[in-house]
Image: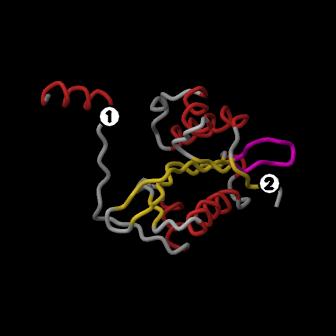
Amino acid sequence: MSFIIRPGEEKDAQSILDLIIELAVFEKEPNAVKITVDNLLQDGFSSNPKFKTFVAEEANGNIIGMVLFYERYSTWKGKAIHLEDLMVTESKRGIGAGKELYASVMKYASNNGFKRVAWEVLDWNTNAIEFYKKTGATVYDEWRVCHMNEQSLTEFCNENI
């Protein structure tokens, strides 16, 4: 293996943000990322982190991939993890880094008593869907993801308070 998987650290914040932006471009949302390195540092590496990361790092110190996840709670299953993003930079895909990052989250979940790991995948990302199915994941067609963005939240609250 030409890389290692390790927990993300403060020094990785810029690389993590770069990968998040690359993922947004891949997902055809190039202007969607609004967070900053400071947000990542505060939210992921402070005394009360909101998320955890693993990174794939080459021997020369370059971060080539990352996975970002956080705890949530399932009323049906109990402790769960939400896998928010899994990304390997385009030039390094196919070397196994994505699979190892994915496995790192699954091992973390299993070793820490989580009952489920959940995530979303775009319906056109057939490579990812096939990979997930091969690992034993169930990809549900009948569940729909719902989002309330900041503007919608404000409007809803202003109308209903």
Residue depicted at x 45% and y 57%: 119
Residue lying at 48% horizontally and 28% vertically, measured from the top left:
34
Disc 2 versus disc 1: distance between alpha carbons? 37 Å
Indicate the quadrant where residue 63 lies.
top right
Kind of element beneath mark 2: strand
Query: Which residue appears farthest toward the front when viewing the image?
Result: 47
Instruction: Examine the residues drawn in magenta and state their main secondary structure.
Output: strand
Query: Residue drawn at (55%, 29%), measured in percent from left and top?
Result: 39
Mark 1, Cα crowd under 10 Å, few <14 / some 14-19 / many 20+, is: few
Q: Which residues are magenta?
A: 55-64
Q: Position of residue 13 (x, y in %)?
A: 66, 34
| Disc nearer the start of the sequence (2/1) | 2
Question: Which of the labelled discs sits on residue 3, or is there none?
Answer: 2
Residue 92 percent coordinates (x, y) = 72, 50
Residue occupying the far right of the picture: 60
Residue 5 in picture, x, y percent from top left: 73, 55
Q: Is residue 40 above or below residue 133?
A: above
Is residue 143 found left or right of 32 in the rendered image?
left
Q: Amino acid at mark 2?
A: Phe
What kind of residue is marked 1? Asn
- Answer above or below: position of 104 versus 56: below
- Which residue is tagged 1? 149
The N terminus, quarter of image? bottom right
20 sits to left or right of 139: right
Q: Nearer the viewer, residue 126 or 17?
A: 17
